[in-house]
Amino acid sequence: MTVDDIHWARTATGLVPVGETEFAHDAAFSYTASDLRDFVAEKARGAITRDDVVSIGRADIRSGGPDRICELLTGLHHGTWVIVNASEYSDLETVAYGALLAERAGKRLLFRTGPSFVRALAGTEPAAPLRGRRLWPAGRPAGHGLIVVGSHVGQTSRQLTVLRAQSDVTGIELSVPGILSGAADLPARTAQQVRDALSRSDVLLYTSRAVAAGGSARHSLQIARAVSAAVASTVRETLPARPAWVLAKGGITAHDVALHGLRIRRAEVAGQLFPGMISVLSPVAAPPEALGVPYVVFAGNVGDDATLAQVVAILNELA
């Protein structure tokens, strides 16, 4: 949620300004600001200042309603950045309505948001978390699932620990030092291990946990992309084993597994496994071996220590 321009993350110890969380220290995407106007300025590296960023406050939303939001948005020009304060779903719905009015008036808007705003903008009612027949309309197929983890934040590593303690999964490590040393056959060899293991249990394919950071954020991002490309290649060569479902954890990982691993070109959003987070996609334009395979997008910074294990349990429930 965002209140008085400060973006807050819900943690096990309560709400924390995002600039004070472990996620702010990411090797490639680090930041210091919790105020979103400062965050935009920080990421723009001087090209945008805090004063260039417009803030829509909760007073605008709750007192002025959609008409006030439309007025604010239609008055902006030249690619102005706008941040939105919201602590309730109703705040998002009011802003979405105002944005639609602004677009009707001819304003062109580009949104960079979390999934909850997409539901509001699409005008759909809140749906219960996916379970049972809503997750498996034709019944859950036989077979085991593939969990792909590239995220290195501490929360992800804690989630892996709980998953391995509570679930019957076969863990297979993809060596980051091996990838960076140029071992071109490493994805193919790892994929063979995954294919063999899928016949017996769910498989946890994870990158080695030691963080390989570069000398700069740019270099760290290059390393992350090289590792993610190797992960996607491994997943692509695993598909002939026909996993019952695929879960990807980590932002770059989820993108690359979808685009280059499963080679999804278009998918429908089936829903979410928990309110406001962890989306399930149904591929509709993809190679035959990926069609019908639910794809779970699990960001690195969501949930608590037990959430990953809970998701795997949900995916293994018989519809």
Image (cartoon, rainbow, N blue to C red):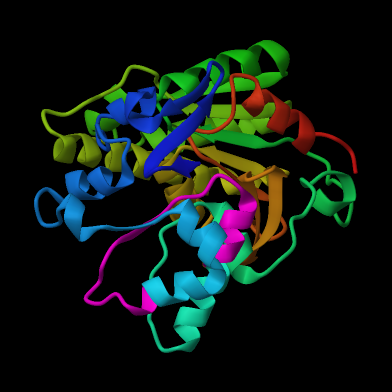
**Number of disc labels:** 0
Q: Residue at x 43, y 33 (%)?
A: 150
Q: Residue at x 59, y 19 (%)?
A: 305
- Magenta span includes 82: yes
Considering only vertical position in the picture, is 117 above or below 40? below
Left or right: 253, with 240 as reference point: left
- Which quadrant, please, contains the C terminus? top right
Which image quarter: residue 152? top left
Q: Is residue 65 above or below residue 150?
A: below
- Taking the image as shown, residue 124 lies to the left or right of residue 318, namely left
* The image quarter in which residue 35 lies: top left
Q: Please tell me whether residue 63 belongs to the stretch shown in magenta.
A: no
Q: Nearer the viewer, residue 111 or 15?
A: 15
Image coords of residue 5 (percent x, y):
37, 44
Where residue 125 appears, as percent x and y from the top left, is: 75, 62
The reply to whether residue 109 is visible in this rendering is no
* Position in image of residue 68 (x %, y %): 47, 71
Residue 236 x/y as whole percent: 50, 49
Q: Residue 159 versus residue 109: which sits nearer the camera? A: 109
Q: Is residue 267 left or right of residue 40?
A: right
Residues in magenta? 73-95
Residue at figure coordinates x 54%, y 40% from the top left: 248
Q: Residue at x 51, y 43 (%)?
A: 235
| Direction from residue 309 to residue 47 in the image, left or right | left
Q: Residue furthest top?
A: 165
Can residue 159 be seen in the rendering of this structure?
yes
